[in-house]
Image (cartoon, coloured by chain):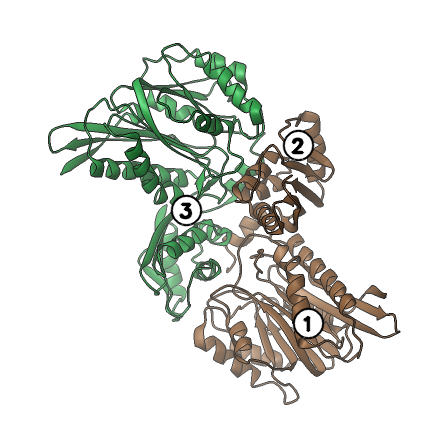
Chain colours: A brown, B green
């Protein structure tokens, strides 16, 4: 047995970790735009990156280093250092070479506009403002935001039966370009658990499928997506089941926070697909629903247009039949296996559900026992406003 | 040699075809909502339908009939007769059983809201208003519109070297739910060419890949998509090459008209992808671009954000590399094989291109010789307005 307790502290909740955010003048109005995470001792690293073929310089830089430990992550917002070729890589080397001597194998991570060289001088000057004795997780979480409207952090203390304990803390950013195959999302997780690199990577990979990869804002996959898990083993404690459960809670929470903060989103919708041919087909349907423009605009209009749900299920490519399909908005069943009973009264009830900030759409395909849950949001005028002219 | 001449007349341009549109009170304000196409003699039929698993009753009804000839197509807008189960099929039988005796094997086609039974009595009454001696292609084209803002028709006269000639005429509707795998689009093509059913179907299938299936408004695939080609052979004339070329021109024109009329669209963008690994990968990239929300909103904002183009190419899954990719807006090259030369002056030039109603985005992947051309549009506030509350 073990006990999970939600605690404050974000990426600084784990023993031996420090973090802060500063302004380097990348964003306007002196907003924080650079953050660091520093660990007293070197960390093992597990990481997952974007599948985008145009993956950004920081990710290529990380991968080129091969197997290594680090005690420092430098993060900047406003510039993605993507589509910047070899220059993008050497810009990172130039920045990291200016860091203090007690920093080993520093890692860099970037998010922002694509196709513009890193403002190297500003970033080098910004890094000189870092104070490695600071524990300011809120400032760090704020500094990595782009179009996010709120910062995203969470931490757990995990107490084991033998009296030992460890911590996992995390921060994330992401509000657009969020997609079932990762997204412009950065997530940094720190832990003082005594976990091996291989085990961390395995647990991270497993949990990502039902958390970040189940979240969609607009179906686009970015050049910079990164989930990084750093372990400094300072607690000396570990339990695989407890670690995995806590990590899943953390990743699921942050994934849902990102969808909730989806550009212009007003609703967080959970798509619970069941009775599909298999889990893979359930995932196809759940992601088709969370990405459908017609579904997303109907959500925005709070219009219980279940026909669009049915049509999207049918168009997904998964095995489906109108005679076995059932659709519900929370507990309001709007269509059941070929029966048409959607009248004015039912429309009113379903509309009430759609007015909620968070609700579930259930699709029971009535075929076999495949299931998957995806997270999505609506799409309204604000999304168009934000994205029609993002760079200016 | 042969000569193609664009002519007036839409679906009535071919010898022996009649058409008209009437109001049956399905739409408000006495707008036309029912159309017919009638041929003096029975026609061979070639057809392509939606791949949506929830395919609508009229499509299931057509497929159940097996091999048959017809002289009559009845079309209604406002109600899709989709997700209506067995009742949807018997409603069609009930409607068609009331048609005059000289009509054989009538076909029905519907478009509109999903999940509501056909207003049978209104449609039966509407059909009684049909006058089979009428040649009113404009009225027919208007009656099949839903969210379309203009009707879509075209016709060609094809003159062969031996002095014989035939005609092909067509009408279409479609403005939303338009997607690379067909769309809520109906297209009816009539011809008096003396062409066999098998040959017609073969030419239709080939041409659809580069026309309707290359067009995207919002990436959703409807329950009712139909392209139907009717031949009454009255001209006695035929030439396969000429027929295929004219049919391709007609289908390409209507596909582009549909994208141009995409819900809320202000721009028609042609995505010309070249030098991909093969044609299939070029198609994947072209369709990813035409469906990307981030690209579509950048188009709407007239923001030459080539980074989103690059990111979408990279996310498409096709082989791609930033060192071999070249991106142009018409003749303005904005990115070339790793070189970053996009400055304020170039941004101004690219912005000028984006202000045009129609332009091309060229993506040369620099890998091999695969190519594909897709058609797409922007996504702005009007799309959200139209789709946030379509049913009311």
Residue on which the image places disc 1? A200
Q: Residue at x 72, y 32 (%)?
A: A349
Cα gap from disc 1 to disc 2, whole angstroms: 43 Å
Decide: few, some or many residues near mark 3? Use Cα within 10 Å; few <14, some 14-19, many ≥20: many
Question: Which quadrant, please, contains the N terminus of chain B?
Answer: top left
Position of residue A112 measured from the top left corner of the image (x, y, whole percent): 55, 65
Q: Secondary structure at mark 1?
A: helix
Quarter occupied by residue B104: top left
Position of residue A225 measured from the top left corner of the image (x, y, whole percent): 57, 65
Q: Are marks 2 and 3 on the same chain?
A: no
Q: Is residue B46 left or right of residue B297?
A: left
Viewer-side label of 2, 3: 2
Q: Are marks 3 and 1 on the same chain?
A: no
Give the chain of mark 2.
A
Tell me whether circle 3 and circle 1 mark residues in contact (CB < 8 Å).
no
Give the chain of mark 3.
B
The answer to whether A324 is drawn above or below residue A160 in the figure is: above
Residue on which the image places disc 3? B376
Q: Residue at x 60, y 74 (%)?
A: A24
Q: Nearer the viewer, residue B18 or A210?
A: A210
Q: Secondary structure at mark 3?
A: strand
Q: Which mark is residue B104?
A: none
Position of residue A158 measured from the top left corner of the image (x, y, whole percent): 82, 68
Residue on which the image places disc 2? A336
Q: Residue at x 15, y 36 (%)?
A: B2
Q: Secondary structure at mark 2?
A: strand
């Amino acid at each position: 047995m073990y006990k999970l307790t939600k605690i404050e502290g974000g990426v600084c909740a784990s023993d031996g970790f420090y973090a802060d955010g500063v302004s380097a003048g990348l964003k306007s109005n002196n907003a924080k735009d650079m953050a660091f995470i520093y660990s007293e001792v070197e960390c093992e690293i597990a990481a997952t990156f974007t599948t985008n073929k145009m993956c950004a310089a920081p990710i290529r830089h990380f991968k080129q280093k091969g197997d290594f430990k680090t005690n420092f992550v430098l993060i900047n917002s406003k510039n993605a250092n993507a589509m910047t070729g070899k220059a993008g890589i050497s810009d990172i080397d130039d920045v990291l070479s200016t860091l203090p001597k007690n920093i080993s194998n520093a890692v860099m991570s970037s998010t922002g506009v694509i196709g513009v060289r890193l403002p190297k001088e500003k970033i080098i000057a910004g890094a000189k403002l870092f104070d490695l004795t600071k524990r300011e997780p809120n400032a760090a979480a704020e500094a990595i935001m782009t179009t996010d409207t709120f910062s995203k952090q969470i931490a757990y203390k995990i107490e084991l039966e033998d009296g030992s304990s460890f911590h996992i803390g995390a921060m994330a950013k992401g509000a657009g370009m969020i997609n079932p195959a990762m997204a412009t999302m950065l997530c940094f997780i720190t832990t003082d658990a005594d976990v091996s690199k291989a085990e961390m990577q395995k647990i991270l990979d497993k949990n990502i499928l039902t958390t970040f990869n189940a979240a969609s804002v607009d179906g686009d996959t970015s050049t910079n997506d990164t989930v990084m898990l750093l372990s400094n083993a300072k607690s000396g404690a570990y339990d695989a089941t407890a670690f995995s459960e806590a990590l899943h809670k953390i990743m699921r929470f942050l994934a849902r926070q990102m969808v909730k903060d989806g550009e212009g989103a007003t609703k967080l919708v959970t798509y619970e697909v069941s009775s599909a041919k298999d889990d893979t087909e359930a995932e196809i349907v759940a992601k088709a629903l969370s990405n459908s423009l017609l579904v997303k605009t109907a959500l925005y209009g709070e219009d219980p247009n279940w026909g669009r749900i049915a049509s999207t299920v049918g168009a997904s490519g998964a095995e489906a039949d109108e005679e076995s399909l059932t659709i519900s908005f929370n507990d309001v069943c709007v269509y059941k296996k070929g029966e048409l009973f959607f009248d004015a009264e039912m429309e009113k009830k379903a509309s009430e559900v759609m007015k909620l900030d968070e609700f579930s759409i259930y699709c029971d395909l009535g075929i076999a026992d495949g299931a998957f849950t995806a997270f999505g949001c609506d799409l309204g005028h604000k999304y168009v406003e934000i994205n029609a002219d993002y760079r200016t």
